[in-house]
Structure formats: C-alpha cells, structure tokens
Image: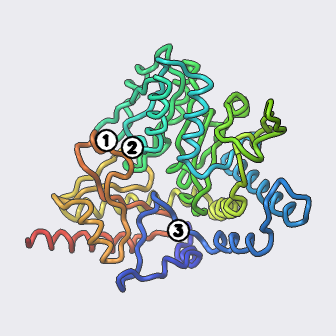
Amino acid sequence: MLDIPIIRQDFPILGHKVYDKPLVYFDNAATTQKPRVVVEKIRDAYYNVNANIHRGVHFLSQAATEAHEEARQTVQQFIHARSAHEIIFTRGTTEAVNLIASGFADAFMSPGDEVILSAMEHHSNIVPWQLQAARKDIALRVVPVNERGELCMESYRDLFSERTKLVALTHVSNVLGTINPVEEIIRIAHRHQVPVMLDGAQAVPHVQVDVQALDAEFYVFSAHKIYGPTGIGVLYGKEEWLEKLPPYQGGGEMIATVAFEKTVFNELPFKFEAGTPDYIGSTAFAEALRYVEGLGIERIAAHEQELLRYATERIQAAGPVRIFGQAAHKSSVLSFLMGDIHPYDMGMLLDRLGIAVRSGHHCAQPLMKRLGIEGTVRASFALYNTKEEIDTLIAGLEQIQTMFLKK
C-alpha cells in the first residue's frame, strides 16, 4: 500500500489553509498538484541548463538538448511506445487533438467522409472536428451513452460505413469516470481498416497505458494531469502515420532546408515541433513520470479505487443524491447532484469549507444535454487523497443540505 502521509509531504500545497480551513483538494481531473521534485526540476533547469536546444554548439545548449531528448525517451518508456520519435511534444491534449484533426482531415478526408466521436467527449475532442467538418464538409457520427454512463457498443458497431475514416474517442470520461473498452473499440475499428485516436488525458494518471498493446494509431495526453507542469503534453503516433501527416505549424526546427522556391521538412519528431519547444517543461514532465513510476501505477490505481468506493458509499448515505456515471469499469471521478441544490452553489459553499471540487458542465455540454442536466459537482481523487478528506467532504455536504432544508 502507498504510505499516504509520507507522500503528502511531497506536496507542500496540501498543507495550506483556505478560509482558515485545511485544504481538501478534489479537483484532480482538472489538474493535479505538483510534488517537490517536479518544481525543483524546473528551478534546477532554469538555474543550471537554460539555453535554447538543438541549435547551439555551446555547453548549455548541448546539456539542455540532452535533457529534453532524455525526457522524450522517458515518455516513450512510460507509455511503451516503440520509438522515441513517435513522441511529439505539444502544449497539451487540446493542441494534440487539433494537430491530428487538421493534419488528418487535410491528408485523408474528402467531402462526405466521416469521423466517429462519442457523446461523452470533452469539448477539446469535439470542436476541432467541427472546425474540420465546416472546412472540409465531413460528417461527425456520435456513439450514444446509456443510463449507466457506458458507450452503447452495438450502436458503435453500426456507425461504420465505407466513408468512415477515423475513430476519435476518450479513453476515460472526465465527467463519468467511465473507463471505455478501448481494446474492443480499436479491434472493431481495425476490422473496418479505420485508424483510432484516443484521448488519454484522464487515463494516463490512473491506469497503465501500453500504446503498442492497445494498437491505437494515435494517443494524446497532458502533463499537468499526471503531476507535471502545465503547458506541455504528448501526441503519440505510429511512425507510419506520422510520416503521412502534413506539418501542423511552420517555423524553425520543423525544417531540414528552406529556400523561397521550396522547403524540405525535418524528420520525426521535429516535423511537428515548430519553434522553441518547452524544454524546461519536458524535463519536469519526465520527472513527474519518474515520480509516478517510483510509486507504481498499479498501487496508485488501487488506492484511488478504494477512495472511489468509499466516497460512493458515503455520499449515497448522506442524503438525496444522484450519481452520474455508474459504469462497471470506472476511474476515480464522482459526479453528483444533491437534492435541488445548484452545482455552482454547492461548489461555492464547499469552497468556503476549504474543499475544492469542480462544478459546472466540465467542458462536456453535449453529455450534460444527454443526461438532462446543466452540470454536476465533481470530486476527483488522486494518489495523495485520503478517506479522512472524503469524510470532510461528506460532512460539508450534510451541512449544506441542512442549510438548504431550513430555507
């Protein structure tokens, strides 16, 4: 088991107080807190090896370049990619999805072609495809979600046609916590010779990801959701597909030679990394992954599952509550409404008790429409959370419920 009291010492912010109350941080699906080693890595990089990479022959540039490329290898090993040049650094999941949407639509799609999405997608895996649909006159087909918050797999099978060019689905729902059956999703798509892109932003912090075993063509995720810095993420792509895609942006680094008559693009992965990369962020990102590996993703997952089980039982006994997302396979997300209390009211009142949750539509408005609600309160758990913190949440909910009943 994880030694949670010792682990919590790695995260100084967890010792803070909010409105004179001990901070209880349950907004981990939005972003996780950062351990000391990650923040210290950023400080160390700026103070000791700060220089633009790949372009300098001097010592600092060479040291920074080596650290950046070692970080790429760390990511490769963490998700079990075949090669480091299949790892593209982006600004995050959103930019990675936009890169795929733009490049894939340009290279492989014609008017009338189709992309399969799902009703539980984050806006970042909806809007980029809508932009391409308007530009290229392609169609979006949507896999429905059942009452338990699971994908309707029969409907998914029926959506394929000769015009289907790509499946782009989330691995884990940021609202429901549903862990989608991605192995089956990929197998079905490949039977139709259709490639798959998975949004792994909510999966990588909580489950073991092996991209070679999954066999998805593309996999995207962000550093800040797995204890790393903001503003950096990853696009993994199979080499043969990355070679086919056109560059997403132009500029320095993504070129081999430039002339006004013609430009020759650089080799992978640099073809997709125009401009100065976040070489400070990449080294801190790698440090976060090493921190997670040191604890063990399986042990982290087991701890979070126990928190989810405990929180679900406690909240169901706390009053009139509706839980959204009761899939058989679920990650550590608990979305709920209590009575007729508006989620924003609940979120603001919990904040006054020192409890940080997320309230609203969670960048998933189509899913909210499917559920027939405006939004939810979402408590999402991470490796440093405790049952005692869940008890504090439940006490806060009961206090707020009493307050509303008296009105």
Quadrant of the rendering where the C terminus is positioned: bottom left
- Which residue is at the front of the view, 340 or 124? 124
Which of labels 2 and 3 is toward the front? 3
Lower position in the chain sequence, tag 2 or tag 1: 1
Cα distance in 3D space between marks 3 and 1? 30 Å
Regarding residue 120, the answer to whether it shows in the image is yes
Q: Which labelled disc corresponds to residue 33? A: 3
Regarding residue 294, the answer to whether it shows in the image is no
Cα distance in 3D space between marks 2 and 1? 8 Å
- The residue at 78%/68% (across/down) is 50
- The residue at 85%/66% (across/down) is 60
8 up-or-down from 198: above or below: below
Lower position in the chain sequence, tag 2 or tag 3: 3
- Which residue is at the front of the view, 145 or 59? 59
The kind of residue on which mark 1 rests is Arg
- Which residue is at the front of the view, 62 or 75? 62
- The residue at 33%/42% (across/down) is 367
304 up-or-down from 133: above or below: below
Residue on which the image places disc 2:
328
